Image (cartoon, rainbow, N blue to C red):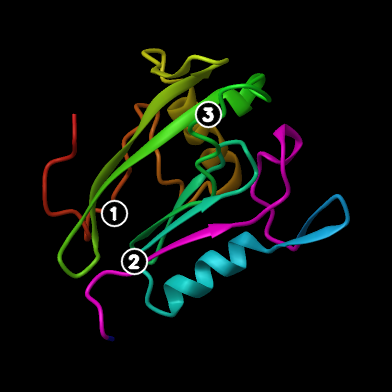
Amino acid sequence: RTFDIVMVSFHGGAEGTKHIHVPKKLERYLGERRGNVHAFAHGVIDAGADLVIGHGPHVPRAMEIYKGRLIAYSLGNFVTTGFGLRSYKGYAPMLQVELSPKGKLIQGRVLSFLQRRYRGVALDPSKKAAHLIHKLGKADFPKSNAVNAKGLIEVPKQVASKPPIR
């Protein structure tokens, strides 16, 4: 009630390319309880959060629109220069989001970068991260997938007040 916009960032979920999908149950990794990220994200939005950004699995995961709010279940790693960059671990999505002064989602997009061993990140013109997040969203959240095939955030019409980013 005190703040106009509340953003929540969390570290959770099992790690690695075998755990790229968002299960709707408690996750474990190497015997450790890593939380139910789906229930957590929905819970913090129900409690008033406007944007939820997850990380921890070291890979990108789906994004979902829940009650007009954006949940990014994992943005993976952005800079991991020396190890673990094979497959999806080398994808480095960056999220660009515009919220209204009261926290409503106006527009957004996923910018795709690739991590390069010992050379940092570089913009990925083929948009691998955005395409992966779109594909995962179709599989994990077919009715509330947030990212379209172009990497743009699909804002529900009753929420949008500006033309989408192109």
Q: Are marks 3 and 2 in contact (CB under 8 Å)?
A: no
What kind of element bears circle 1?
loop
Q: What residue did someone put label 3 on?
A: 132
State which quarter of the image contains the C terminus.
Answer: top left
What kind of element bears circle 3?
helix
Residue 4 in magenta stretch: yes
Point out the tag, 3 or 1, that comes first from the N-terminus: 3
What residue is at 82 percent from the left and 59 percent from the top?
32
What residue is at 38 percent from the left and 71 percent from the top?
49
Point out the tag, 1 or 2, that comes first from the N-terminus: 2
Image position of 36 (left or right of 33)? left
Point out the tag, 3 or 2, that comes first from the N-terminus: 2
What residue is at 12 percent from the left and 42 percent from the top?
163
Q: What residue did someone put label 2 on?
A: 50
Instruction: Give percent across and percent down for residue 155.
Output: 28, 50
Q: What residue did someone put label 1 on?
A: 156
The residue stretch that appears in magenta:
2-26
User: Which is more foreground, mark 1 or mark 2?
Assistant: 2
Instruction: Give percent across and percent down for residue 98.
Output: 22, 50
Instruction: Give percent across and percent down for residue 67.
Output: 38, 67
